Amino acid sequence: MTQAAAMTTGAATADAAIHLRDVSVHFGDITGLKEASFDIAPGEFVSVVGPSGCGKTTLLNLLTGLLPVQTGTVKVLGKPAREGNSDVAYMLARDCLLPWRTTLGNAMYGMEARGLLPGKEREKKAHHLLERVGLHGFADQYPKALSHGMRQRNALARTFCLDSPVLLMDEPFGALDAQTKLQLEDLLLDLWREHQKTVVFITHDLGEAVALSDRVMVMSARPGRIVADIKIDLPRPRSVRDLQKSHEFHEIYTEVWEVLEAGMKS
């Protein structure tokens, strides 16, 4: 491997925004996750890739507290992971917009559910995020009037409105066409730089993982193990579009693919 794709141990435990040690998850007789350990520093963008069923979403569910810890340690911002933690925002693959609420109403929904900000301030913040994601002028539209890409923009605005320091994303752009996907990837990088969140990003798209991330963790086939933690040594700020022409980007992509392919056979 090149220096750009060397193994890395991540943040020191004491400074980690996310900390896992020796975590295994069993579903009856099936081991879904085996002895996972890693640390993620505050403000780091880390992607997780691996074959279907290897435990990627299981990792996110542990961090949200939706899945109880069976063995090992899971901490978020120094505290045990727990359900309903306002320090964590979770963006799913589906937009999950409420059809009876407008674009503005959906952007504000998370803030309302958590009781964040007075009404006028809440609306002002939602309008700002809608403008940032390119939905200015669509505040009064309902989800049925939005394209798939616009709906994901709405969901992205809703997520960033929460202002949680930790953002978990489970294949949020997986169902989009290539052009819209590139647009939203660049938008996500802009918002990430602006808000300085710690991001754990699940994807099956290796190019997406390399382009967005500071590190890419590669998981093996079930039982899911972390078989590599690869530092992505590409300069920031980045343009996902421009990286498509970069030799260094394609070199790292190839190395990540080789590790993933080996893990699928293990």
Image (spheres, grey):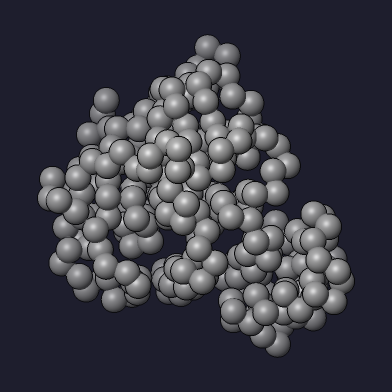
Note whether 1 is above or below 174 in the view shown.
above
Question: Residue visible at 52% across and 59% down?
Answer: 197
Which residue appears at 47% of the width and 32% of the height? 20
Give the camera-side residue of 207 and 132.
132
Q: Quadrant of residue 94?
A: bottom right
Is residue 215 visible from the viewing direction of this image? yes
Left/right of residue 173 with respect to residue 154 in the rendered view: left
- Left or right? Give the position of 126 relative to 150: right
Task: Give the farthest residue toward the top.
Answer: 29
211 left or right, relative to 148: left
**Quick one: quadrant of the C terminus?**
top left
The image quadrant where one finds the N terminus is top left
- At 69% across and 60% down in the image, what residue appears? 162
On the image, the x and y values in percent for residue 251 come to: 16, 57
Q: Residue furthest bottom?
A: 137
What is the tally of numbered marks visible in this picture? Answer: 0
Seen in the image, is 174 located left or right of residue 216?
A: right
What is the x, y in percent for residue 214? 34, 55
Q: Residue at x 27, y 46 (%)?
A: 230
In depth, the one of 9 and 156 nearer the eye is 9
Q: Position of residue 45 (x, y in %)?
A: 42, 55
- Place of residue 194 in the rendered image (x, y in percent of width and height, measured from the top left): 51, 71
Q: Quadrant of residue 7?
A: top left
Of 9 and 216, nearer the camera is: 9
